[in-house]
Image (spheres, helix red, strand yellow):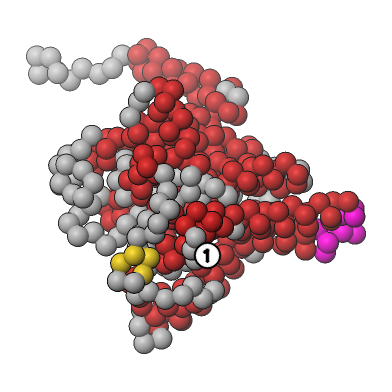
Amino acid sequence: MADGLITREPPATRRLSLGSWRDVVARYRLMPWWAKVLAVFVLSRVISTAYLVGFARIQATNYWTVQSPGYFDFAKIWDGTWYWIIEQQGYPSVLSVVDGHVGQNAWAFMPVYPMVIKVFMLLTGASFGVVAVCVSVAAAAGTSLLLYRLLRTTLPGETALFGVVVFCVSPLSPLLQVAYAESLFLLLLCAALLLLVQRRYWAMVPVTAVAAFTRPGVVALSLALVLHFGYRWWHRRSSPFPARERVTVVVVAGVTGILGFAWPLVAAIVTGDLHAYTDTELSWRADYIGYGALVPFAPWIDGANWWFPHGAGLIYLVVLVVLFAGFLISPWARRIPVDLRLWSAAYAVYLLAVFFPQSSTFRILMPMFPLVGALAVPRSKVYRLALVVVLVGLQWVWLYYCWWVNGLDWTPP
């Protein structure tokens, strides 16, 4: 405003701005696929980093940090501390016992992630928190690139790219840049699934071998291979399934299953306790339902009854399973590679068999991330924009309730 008059932007300037924007869009469209994926990933990290920094500033003094910790200290709370302990001390040969039961200890956390961090700490001299975040971010970027390749096997390029967008802004995407092993496990899992879709079965073995010592869940990949075998056998007339490939799938499925139980075997050998790993894992659910043996498929029933007593929980559980099965056969889901749906079904069975549902459930569900391809199928701009806005908003919700430590917090991530 000048001398009481409202000045307007000259038309030439407006045209220049519009032209510049169009130039940016044109340049983006000419970028190779990997550059587009990395651009999406970087922009999503800006959002999640802003969230994490904001929560760190209002974080009160707690078990892990002082008041208003720095980003890297805030990024290594919760399970991140266990990985720091492993990097510093390794694993105990004698299990801690509390009231006659095995207590929480480092054997619940596998060694690949903390050992990778240790190597880079020695090479760079940087602190645990800095290296842990860098390793997680690098692995998450790699996962985004592989996810695009994976979805691109059956989906158009722009749909596959939006699938990556959904993955990068999902409610738990802040976990991709903290001291958790999820990013590294998702990278290895995505590589294994891509090899499965490409039917490069032998190449899956070294990948799953590393994944088996990164996070639990590889045993579900063995079940996925069994389902893959069944699918290919059923469709062998329209898509040949030679005897050599049948033998290969059976052998790789068996090896993968053995790898899935390798870490519990290592824990048993080192501690001299055959149940060292399972008893350690069960100690985390003791605060909910007390100590007890691991009975396959009982945890979700116990959890349903604990969260929703008087029989209501079982009804909700059945409804949840039916809805998930319905989603896997929906038109959207059927657009993604069938092996991704078989993996998701196998992983769901694995979780139903061994996992007790609580606030960590959302994190434990992350290996089903290839299903973002189904959410990316609708091409409506309104739908896609609304989905991104909702997912970004849910990041705040998850950080508030599960990551940020609010007093005696019973909602660990």
Q: Quadrant of the C terminus?
A: bottom left
Hey, which quadrant is residue 73 in on the image?
A: top left
Residue 42's place in the image compared with 75, above or below, is above
Which secondary structure is most common in the magenta stretch?
loop
Q: Camera-side residue: 168 or 253?
A: 253
In the rendered image, residue 90, in percent from the top left (x then y), is placed at 41, 44
Residue 242: say if magenta: yes
Residue at 50%, 29% in the rendered image: 38
Is residue 383 visible in the rendered structure shown here?
Answer: no
Above or below: residue 308 compared with residue 94:
below
| Residue 56: percent from left, percent from top | 22, 41
Residues in magenta, as a range:
232-243
- Please name the amino acid that badge 1 sits on: Leu
Q: Height in image: 389 above or below 243?
A: above
In the figure, is residue 380 to the left or right of 393?
A: right
Q: Secondary structure at mark 1?
A: loop
Relative depth, front residue between 345 and 157: 345
Q: Which residue is mark 1?
A: 274
Image spot of residue 350 (x, y percent):
57, 65
For label 1, count other residues whose C-alpha is less than 10 Å away and answer few (under 14), some (14-19) or many (20+). Answer: some
Q: Residue at x 46, y 78 (%)?
A: 301
Does residue 396 appear to the left or right of 4 in the view shown?
right
Q: Relative to the observer, which residue lies in front, 376 or 324?
A: 324
x, y (%) of residue 12?
Answer: 37, 12
